[in-house]
Image (cartoon, helix red, strand yellow):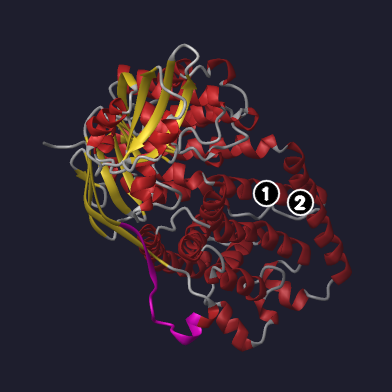
Amino acid sequence: MRSMSLMLEKPLAFILRDIIEDTSYKMSFVMQFVNMFISTSMFYFFSRLLGDAGTAYLGPYGGNYFSFVLIGIAFSSYLSVSMKSLANTIREGQMMGTLEALLVTQTGIPTIVISSSLYSFIWATFKVIVYLLLGALVFGVDLGNVNIIGAGIMLLLTIISFGSLGIFSASFVMVLKRGDPVNWIFSSVSGLLGGLYYPITVLPEWLQTISYLLPVTYALEGMRMAVLKGHTLSELMPNILALTIFSIIMLPMSILVFRYAVRKAKKDGTLTQY
Amino acid sequence: MSYIIETVNLSKSFPVLKGFGEIFLHPFRKKRISALRDINIQVEEGDIFGLLGPNGAGKTTLIKILCTLVLPSSGSACVKGHDVTRDEKSVRKLIGYVISEERSFYWRLTGRQNLKFFAKLNNIPNGESERRIGRLLDFLELADDADRMFKDYSTGMRQKLAIARGLLTDPAILLMDEPTNGLDPVTAQNLKTLISEKLAGEEGKTVLFATHNLRDAEELCSRIAIIRGGEVGFSGTIRDAKMKFKGPKRYMLKIRNAHNGLTGIISNMEQVKNIMPMSNGSSGFTEIEVEIGRDAGGIQGFVRDIIDMGAEVFSVYEIEPKLDELFSEIVGAK
């Protein structure tokens, strides 16, 4: 019972720490909201410029570029958080000197790394809500068809599959400190091929084939279908299955790699170096 | 006898970063640098044990191995019987690591918030954590500043908070790395009093601290180990260390009615390595400090010689060698 409550209390302690730190930089905190409004407005005007030009490609998503890209930018923040926050936790801890203090506590390294990134995930979720509210209330995006359960399942699988990539990335940072190839490959390739700003159907076929190797493609497509078109769970099943398989393979593998990285860093004496 | 901390033939080497040229020419050749070699130290329960050595001697590496942050290359290190490589969790329960690096705190959190956060990570229940933090803040005289952001703390307050963090779990062993570094003399003295009187004295904790400040070690430590170039040059009590001193012995002589040329004659004597007149006869006494070579028949022969020259020797006592002399001797022998 006590260990169960600790399992919750420790992540909460990290979240509280990050809230206090983040809100203590008041200007930066406010600016993040302003930025969200600016980027949403930018894509809104961009979609007005496009008009009906993209309808052929956007048909499966409701035909409107703004609602398409809104889901893209909102949910891609999960990708960026997964890829960056876990690795950043290690890197920042190494540079700031806090990692050493954390590692001599009676908390395991996986708990430290995952709990350190929770606030970023919560913040990303909050941003998604703000993006959707801005889209619906200010820019007239129709969210009337949303399948909440489907979107929730897609979100959970998105976080798990992206999170495993993040753990891989953190393993590289633990050993290499800089120049993490996982982050570079997935962040840049996902931006290009994952369907963030345009449907993957605009890509040549061979690139479309590659895009289906990326979890972000299934995550964004499934999310758009659930939020904009209200697809049922059975209609979302191909995306759910793809992300589940990806998670089942990648999550344990990433944890193994991470454990190896920690052991190597301890052997090399570079655990807290940067 | 079982020791609370014991290392047996502990060695550590680190891989060396290779340059581009070397990566290209010898991609598979591994270069390593030795940081610790066959370290054998024993710390008894309740000891204040000083780990002395110049910069780069390997003190911090040894402390990090004992904290489970670095794995040894060979040999073993045990904390209260728990091996640091096989039983990391048990070791971490027993130790409090006082990290003097002020960057190891969250600067935008208050002192109390920092302690609460680390208490949670050390599995201390909420109610107990409040009590312990309150007690530690009082103990370290930080209670009035507990709710100020860490960034607004002075260096001394930061050091005290680091000690409070190390004591959160009420550990049997405190490991400290250069605890008085960067502190003004008054704060450093208060800290030393805290370590010797409160932590070791009242609370009975074992304290192992690394320092290159020999005065700190001399004031605080019951036992020391001097590390040079990754090897233990000496380990034992400070008294043992002084007994082993091989340099010339120093004596203070008080001579009555010394004639004018006496110090000049003494300085030319074969067995005298050095002479320092301390005071010159206004009250009828002359005090001189002399260094006598160990292979020169000792102080008795010297005193007899100067008595034969007509000096009236009033008193003679041996001056204990200073720890820094011993330190120089051991480190210099490398």
Q: Is residue A180 magenta?
A: no
Tag 1's secondary structure? Answer: helix
Q: Which region of the structure is painted magenta? A: B22-36
Q: Chain of mark 1?
A: A
Relative image position of residue A147 (x, y in whole percent): 58, 54
Q: Are marks 2 and 1 in contact (CB under 8 Å)?
A: yes
Does mark 1 fall on the same chain as mark 2? yes
Amino acid at pointer 2: Met
Residue B210 visible? The answer is no
Tag 2's secondary structure? Answer: helix
Amino acid at pointer 1: Lys
Pick the quarter of the image with the N terminus of chain B.
top left
Q: Is residue B222 above or below residue A42?
A: above
| Residue hosting label 1 | A127
Counting labels gives: 2
Sooner in the amino-acid sequence: mark 2 or mark 1: 2
